[in-house]
Image: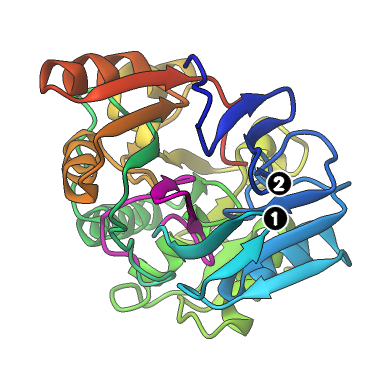
Amino acid sequence: MPSRADDLVIASPEGLYCPAGGFHIDPSRPVPVAVITHGHGDHARSGMGTYHVAREGLPILQWRLGKQDYRVHPAGERFRIGGVQVSLHPAGHVLGSTQVRIEAGGETWVVSGDYKRDPDPTCLPFEVVHCDVFVTESTFALPIYRWAPASDVARDIEAWRVECEAQGEAAILYCYALGKAQRVLAELAPISPRPALLHGAIDAGVAVYRDAGVEMLPTQRVSELARDADVAGSLVLAPPSAAGSPWIRRFRRAQQGFASGWMRIRGNRRRRNLDRGFVVSDHADWPSLLRTVEQTGARRVVAMHGDSAALVRVLCSRGLDAATLDAGYGEDD
């Protein structure tokens, strides 16, 4: 995206930068002032001088980054940084995730961070914020990416667990430790009669969500079980990094699944040698991306991350001023 002289947000080596405010958004390198949209590792990093964060997101940052100079803001409350007015608005991605609204010189920009429009019992829903320029993620910006209700996917996961139980197997479900695991547990809470078992990396994040008042399926840490414990019929949540590790080998009879939007492409499941793939994502799908851009009323759109070129082509065909931007973000976890 070529920068314009009066742009409120531009690309810099450290990531997105607001020149009029003198701060970065989700910087990839140490900077004096950072505004953080949420706690995933590709958005929240250590080494910043000051961290501006939404109140609901503070526990996640403290878990991930420890003690820092945090400036905490209620959702929607306006505050000044340098020469601009800033406010943080719910993004519906994970607990405490926000969009960054920036206003100066009669113009308003919104940097979405990561977001989704589907219901999620673990975080505040996405808030449409009207703006002149909308900087949107585009992780799943292809027409093939369309999400079924997460509650339906949870019923599929429970049916798989029951199937594994009948065969004397555990059901190991790989999912991201922040956001995805907690959402799966929250969706399973009203339908599953059996507590889930957790890898230690998953358990730490679940504890943060429980402390925030999020209701989820009862859980137990795998490390607390006896080595010879019967885990047939148990749903076991583990991070993707646990696949093929010595930790997995303690489950001698098990099927393995993955909960991710990437499971929408069947080849991804085959390449990972998985028994099951469950399509559940904490990002906006294709229809939601188009709907959100329209609802913001933005006259200019900047798309970053993922299939941004496809989204830009469609938006330009609809008469919008749209372009891509490489902000350097990666996987959620």
Residue at mark 1: 82
Picture residue at 55% right of the left edge, 36% below the top: 9
Task: From the top left corner, tell me how far across and down residue 74 is, in percent.
Answer: 55, 78
Residue 153 appears left or right of 40? left
Residue 333 appears left or right of 163? right
Disc on the earlier residue, 2 or 1: 2
Picture residue at 74% right of the left edge, 34% below the top: 28
Residue at mark 2: 23
Task: From the top left corner, tell me how far across and down residue 288 is, in percent.
Answer: 21, 43
How many neighbours does mark 1 have within 10 angstroms: few (below 14), some (14-19), or many (20 or more)?
few
Picture residue at 23% right of the left edge, 40% below the top: 293
Label 1 element class: loop
- Residue 292 visible (yes or no): yes
**Stretch of the chain drawn in magenta:** 93-120
Q: Amino acid under label 2?
A: Phe
Query: Relative to 321, does residue 86 appear above or below in the rendering?
Result: below
Instruction: For the residues labelled 2 and 1, say whether their Cβ atoms are less than 8 Å apart.
Output: yes
Asked if residue 103 is among those painted magenta in the image, a careful observer would answer: yes
Q: In whole angstroms, how far apart are the C-alphas of marks 2 and 1?
A: 8 Å
Label 2 element class: strand
Between residue 156 and residue 329, name the one nearer to us: 329
Q: Quadrant of the C terminus?
A: top right
Between residue 235 and residue 100, name the one nearer to us: 100
Asked if residue 84 is among those painted magenta in the image, a careful observer would answer: no
Query: Relative to 162, does residue 318 appear above or below in the rendering?
Result: above
Residue 239 appears left or right of 318? right
Q: Amino acid under label 1?
A: Gly
